[in-house]
Amino acid sequence: MSTPNLDFERFPIGKFERPAAFTPATRAEAVATLRELSTCLADALHGLSDPQLDTPYREGGWTVRQLVHHIADSHTNSLLRFKLALTEDNPTIKPYRQDAWAALADSRLPVDVSLRLVAAVHERWVALLESMHDADFGRGYTHPENGPQSLDLALAIYAWHSRHHTAHITRLRERKGW
């Protein structure tokens, strides 16, 4: 059983909650979060040393470095899933083993590599999102483990994901006094 403190470290902004409704306003807020992620992430990482980047953000969690590379991996996959959903009828997407990806050699690279990737992916993703019509957000894909997901739901999940992982870094800094 987890302690409340470890739950807070694991879910610093709380677990994802599906919005009651998907509206142009909720979409605009989520798109703004994606637009701002690369800046927020860079601010959260500013001034961290290599030993600090190699510190797990929580007991049993990834290092900050792995976390940054995970965000780049995850959000790149999401952009591609959006493009598949917009160009195919309910495609089945391929999941990936994020823990195994986080253990690969590229997850030891400097975080700047993934910060640049996140900035580029998000520039393209936001341009795509801003070109979409309301009906486009009803399109979706099937995740083999999680079932059908609309692009509205995926957008909400990735806005949460952006805030969630940025908070892992900022809360670690607060706890450590960095």
Image (cartoon, rainbow, N blue to C red):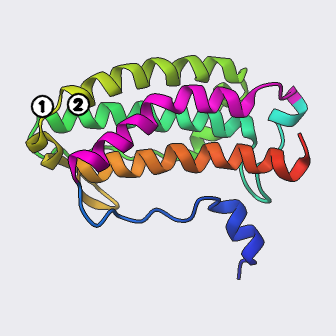
The reply to whether residue 178 is in sight is yes
Please report the bounds of the magenta region as a residue range: 23-50
Decide if residue 142 is on the left or right side of residue 72: left
> Residue shown at 75%/51% (left/top)?
171
For this view, does 68 lie left or right of residue 145?
A: right
Mark 1 and mark 2 in contact? Answer it, CB < 8 Å.
yes
- Based on the picture, tell me whether residue 113 belongs to the magenta stretch: no
- Amino acid type, mark 1: Thr
- The residue sitting at 77% across, 71% down in the picture is 5
Q: Is residue 91 left or right of residue 114?
A: left
Q: Secondary structure at mark 2?
A: helix
* Residue furthest out toward the front: 25
Residue indicated by mark 2: 83
Residue occupied by mark 1: 87
Q: Which mark is residue 5?
A: none
| Rendered image quadrant of residue 69 | top right
Rendered view: 38 above or below 62: above
Q: Quadrant of residue 6?
A: bottom right
User: Is residue 68 left or right of 71 when viewed as pictured?
Assistant: right
Question: How dense is the environment of label 2, judged by Cα within 10 Å: few (below 14), some, or many (20 and up)?
Answer: some
